[in-house]
Amino acid sequence: MQQVQHQMMGYDRASTMFSPDGRLLQVEYAKKTVRQGSSAMGVVCKDGVILVADKRIAEKLILPHSVEKIFQVDDHIAATPTGLVMDGRVLIERAQLIAQQHRVTYDDNIDILTLVKEISDIKQAHTQYGGVRPFGVSLLIAGINEIGHLYMTDPTGIYFEYKATVIGEFEQEIKNILEKSYKETMNMDSGLKLAINALKTVLGKEFSIERVDAIKIPQSTKKFERLDAEDLKKYNI
């Protein structure tokens, strides 16, 4: 009721306008948009990191292999957006540019946290200035420095590092599965089985391996590897 009253009074007309109880309503709306997006998970394993996302293919005539939910940022970094995917694409293209500029300047891989901070700063700026709206997207950014790292950034510009996490639809249900079954000693094969089984559990009859997008970055190579439907069938148990 209070939020409806705030809307009627116009406190949600701009991302720069605080409501009387100290909330930025446009930013809260952006976070709700993320919760309506398709599920995406990240898991840090003892031998690398993985990302698994639901493509949520909307039409039967779309070719599943043409839908990408996980994107390569650099050789050793990947990212997946949830929410307004077009917002995520813009941020990921910015991340790719930042990573390329770092490689040209320093002849070395960019540190993952450095990249996460840059993207988070861009998100935060869109909650502070007039004439723009907040990015309606959360990102999971995973990669290998010396060890595996997994970060989540939300529409506010805040970020956290995780051992395993999920964003988007069925967030709480999948988070419960991860909290119950995740082990720091699991390898990437076990992590992929866990993530795919979590999607299978929440999607039920709508689940098919063709709607799963997945990548891994092994610690041994520090190289992005995309897994196709044939690769993923052995993890669908």
Image (cartoon, grey):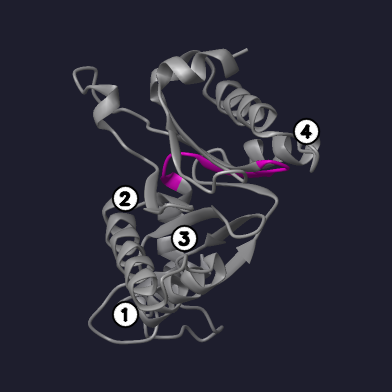
State whether residue 156 appears in this view: no
Residue located farthest toward the left when viewing the structure as drawn: 61
- 109, 65: nearer the viewer: 109
On the image, numbered disc 3 is attached to which residue? Answer: 31
Tell me the quarter of the picture where residue 183 sits.
top right
What residue type is disc 3 on?
A: Lys
Q: Earlier in the sequence, mark 4 or mark 1?
A: 1
190 left or right, relative to 23: right
On the image, numbered disc 2 is attached to which residue? Answer: 85
Image quadrant holding the C terminus, namely top right
Q: Residue at x 79, y 43 (%)?
A: 184
- 24, 11: nearer the viewer: 24
Image height of 47 relative to 85, above or below: above
**Residue 1, percent from left and from top:** 51, 64
Crowd tier of the residue under label 1, counting other residues whose Cα lies within 10 Å: few below 14, some 14–19, many 20 or above: many
Q: Which residues are magenta?
A: 36-47
Crowd tier of the residue under label 2, counting other residues whose Cα lies within 10 Å: few below 14, some 14–19, many 20 or above: many
**Label 3: which secondary element:** helix
Q: Nearer the viewer, mark 2 or mark 3?
A: 2
**Label 4: which secondary element:** helix
Crowd tier of the residue under label 3, counting other residues whose Cα lies within 10 Å: few below 14, some 14–19, many 20 or above: many
On the image, numbered disc 4 is attached to which residue? Answer: 181
Q: Nearer the viewer, mark 1 or mark 2?
A: 2
8 left or right, relative to 142: left
Q: Earlier in the sequence, mark 1 or mark 3?
A: 1
Mark 2 to mark 4: distance in Å?
29 Å
